[in-house]
Amino acid sequence: MSTEALVIVDFQNDFTPGGALAVPHGDEIAGRVRELAESGRFDLVVATRDWHPADHGSFAERGGPWPPHCVQDTPGAQLHDGAPTDRIDVIVDKGQDPGTDGYSGFEATELEQVLRDRGVDRVTVVGLATDYCVKNTALDALRKGFEVEVDRDGVRGIDVKPGDVEQALDEVRAAGGTVT
Ligand code: VGL
Ligand code: ZN
């Protein structure tokens, strides 16, 4: 029997329609994410938040690729209303270092320790966006030796370049993860 965690990546207002960096149809993951969170299958439910300082290097005004988004303590950085907050055990904030992208939930955070402390060996990743933070979180989890599943109905991507989402899922499979 494995000990399983559900990792909900960046299901935040700024990544949903109307937000500063909206992922198309990002709000539509709510039902599937809640279904998984309530399934009884997970020993731990973690939510990550993109949690940038106002001068983050990924913002266009600093020469980065993105409009300002998920600035710490702003409404855009709050978890979306559709996130199953009543089922979330731990919130992990990421992207706080102004000089690094912080796409992975494992980058400069306590996420690995939280999972190890609970004896987790298998993670299911859902959230936003498939081609950035979901992908990088899933690949880091694989590198760290966790079994990893990405739940297709529980993710949405940006597709800056059409095909980016499919390529991201291919990369997860190639690295040993499953996409269901
Ligand atoms: C993300 C772009 C910039 C993500 C975060 O959560 O996928 N994408 N910051
Ligand atoms: Zn970001």
Image: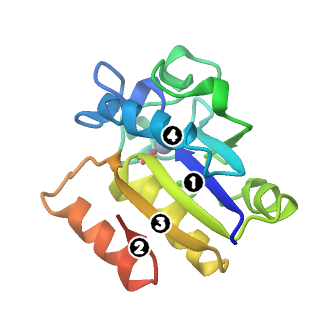
Indicate left or right for 176 with 77 as reference: left
Mark 1 or mark 3: whose residue is earlier in sequence: 1
Residue located beneath label 3 in the image: 149
Mark 1 C-beta to ligand 2 under 8 Å? yes
Q: Quadrant of residue 110?
A: bottom right
Q: Position of residue 130 (x, y in %)?
A: 35, 54
Q: Is residue 96 visible?
A: no
Front-most of residues 109 and 87: 87
> Element at badge 3?
strand
Q: Quadrant of residue 180?
A: bottom left
Residue located beneath label 2 in the image: 178
Quote the CA–CA distance across marks 4 and 1.
12 Å
Indicate left or right for 66 with 103 as reference: left
Front-most of residues 14 and 144: 144
Mark 3 or mark 2: whose residue is earlier in sequence: 3
Q: What amino acid is found at the position of numbered circle 1 in the picture?
A: Gly
Mark 2 C-beta to ligand 1 under 8 Å? no
Mark 4 C-beta to ligand 1 under 8 Å? yes
Residue located beneath label 1 in the image: 102
> Element at badge 4?
loop
Indicate left or right for 65 with 115 as reference: left
Q: Is residue 86 visible?
A: yes
Specify the label residue 10 is tagged with: 4
At 21% from the left and 52% from the top, the residue drawn is: 159
> Element at badge 1?
loop
Mark 3 C-beta to ligand 1 under 8 Å? no
Quote the CA–CA distance across marks 1 and 2.
23 Å
Q: What amino acid is found at the position of numbered circle 2 in the picture?
A: Thr
